[in-house]
Image (tube, grey):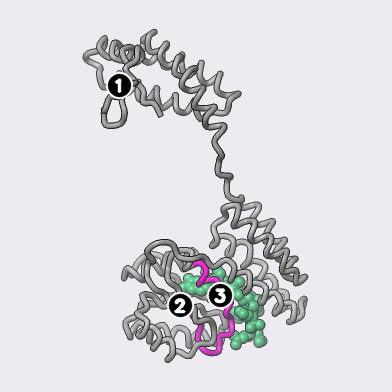
Amino acid sequence: MRYAGGQAPGGTRRDSDATPQRSARGRLLARQPNTHSDGGGQLVAGEMALLFVLAAPEPVLAVVASELSARLAHDAGSQSFLALASRRARIWGRSAVETARSAPRAPAPPSSRRLTVAAERVHAALVAGDEAAVRQSVTTLVEEGAPIIEVIQKVIVPPLVKIGADWHDGLLTIWVEHRASAIVERILGGLATNPRGRRRGTVMVAAVSGDFHSLPTSMAAVALRDDNWAVEHLGANMPPEELLRFCVEHDVDVAVLSSTNPDTAELAADTAERLRAAGTPVVLGRPGSSLDDLIASTRSAARGVTSGVRPQM
Ligand code: B12
């Protein structure tokens, strides 16, 4: 990257930039001794605008460049600045555009619309027991840059909620729901990432005795691993006493409880109180609590923050 006027950031002048362009800028400023800062501001603004020109698509480039040059000439009141701006747009700008064109660009992550379409496809595949199709949809989205939490929340959760509702309404048999759950459990296993660098701390994830819904604990475990926590995933149906013992013995920073079965909601809340009383911060998620809430509340709990997003604790 060349810096206009032969100046690198911090004002270090580079010898290779000692060009006539620099003296053109020097002459321009020298002619306006009382408006140095204004003149410099116009130049900086002009150069930022030039950068914009460099990034513009080619068809737009020519039009914008000529408009910009005219505008800069008007503002600076200087034919030499016009010459400088035009020359840079033509010579420096052109080659930078070509360089940018040839460089590989990261594709945009999948749009929200694509996630919705994928959720419909995943729902159909789960009902049909087509594990390969579910895997393909999920893997493609992750490879294309969709955040794992978003894929779980927007592509996996809605089909499960619909399957649960259809089972409740007698539209689906129980084996369709069981088979779909088993597929999701395996897919989630494939999404578990390895923590990078220094972990934020250690979390324990579980559901209490009598709550057989292990999937929400798996979703929480994947999301927390993705957020770089060391995760002790104990799964569903865990006796409260064992959770208390585990947290003390393993120096757990935050206990994460998932509560899905309404019949054990009270036990989950009691367990949370007992864990807190024993010195372990707790976050408790219920149906409808999002994984974004989970991440925010776990981070807050680990910092000992009592305000902010701490859903249903
Ligand atoms: C799969 C499933 C089962 C499977 C569980 C398999 C498994 N391995 O998990 C099985 C067959 C065991 C099962 C059993 C039952 N189930 Co069930 N089940 C479901 C289903 C379809 C999906 C559950 C799920 O994974 N939900 C997770 C996602 C999809 O939803 P979510 O609750 O919003 O979860 C989010 C949060 O929990 C968050 N999260 C997780 N941890 C944490 C922690 C924190 C701190 C935060 C902030 C967030 C967070 O992550 C999730 C994603 O965002 C739901 C449908 C549904 N709407 O959920 C019914 C559902 C939960 N089940 C239901 C029922 C009634 C039962 C049974 C009582 C049925 C019966 N008569 O036997 C039993 C209870 C068994 C027991 N003792 O627990 C009802 C509950 C109704 C209610 N709320 O009153 C539901 C809603 C179905 C329905 N529409 O009626 N079930």
Disc number placed over residue 232 in the picture, else none:
2
* Label 1 residue SS: helix
Residues at marks 2 and 3 touching, judged by CB atoms closer than 8 Å: no
Judge by depth and name the residue closer to the eye, 147 or 306.
Answer: 147
Reply yes or no: does residue 159 show up in magenta.
no
Q: Nearer the viewer, mark 2 or mark 3?
A: 2
If the image is split into quadrants, where does the C terminus sit?
Answer: bottom left
User: Mark 2: which amino acid?
Assistant: Glu
Q: Is residue 119 left or right of residue 253?
A: right
* Label 2 residue SS: strand
Q: Nearer the viewer, mark 1 or mark 3?
A: 1
If the image is split into quadrants, where does the N terminus sit?
Answer: top left
Reply yes or no: does residue 217 show up in magenta.
yes
Give the vertical position of 6 relative to 205 (above or below): above
| Image quadrant where residue 186 sits | bottom right
User: Mark 1: which amino acid?
Assistant: Asp
Judge by depth and name the residue closer to the eye, 168 or 24.
Answer: 24
Q: Residue at x 71, y 61 (%)?
A: 120
> Magenta span covers which residues?
205-223
Disc number placed over residue 15 in the picture, else none:
1
The Cα atoms of the two marked residues, 1 and 2, are separated by: 58 Å
User: Mark 3: which amino acid?
Assistant: Pro
Judge by depth and name the residue closer to the eye, 93 or 114.
Answer: 93
Label 3 packing within 10 angstroms: few (<14), some (14-19), many (20+): many
Query: Of marks 2 and 3, which one's residue comes earlier in the chain?
Result: 3
Q: Circle 3 is placed at which residue position?
A: 216
The Cα atoms of the two marked residues, 2 and 3, are separated by: 14 Å
Query: Of marks 1 and 3, which one's residue comes earlier in the chain?
Result: 1
* Label 3 residue SS: helix
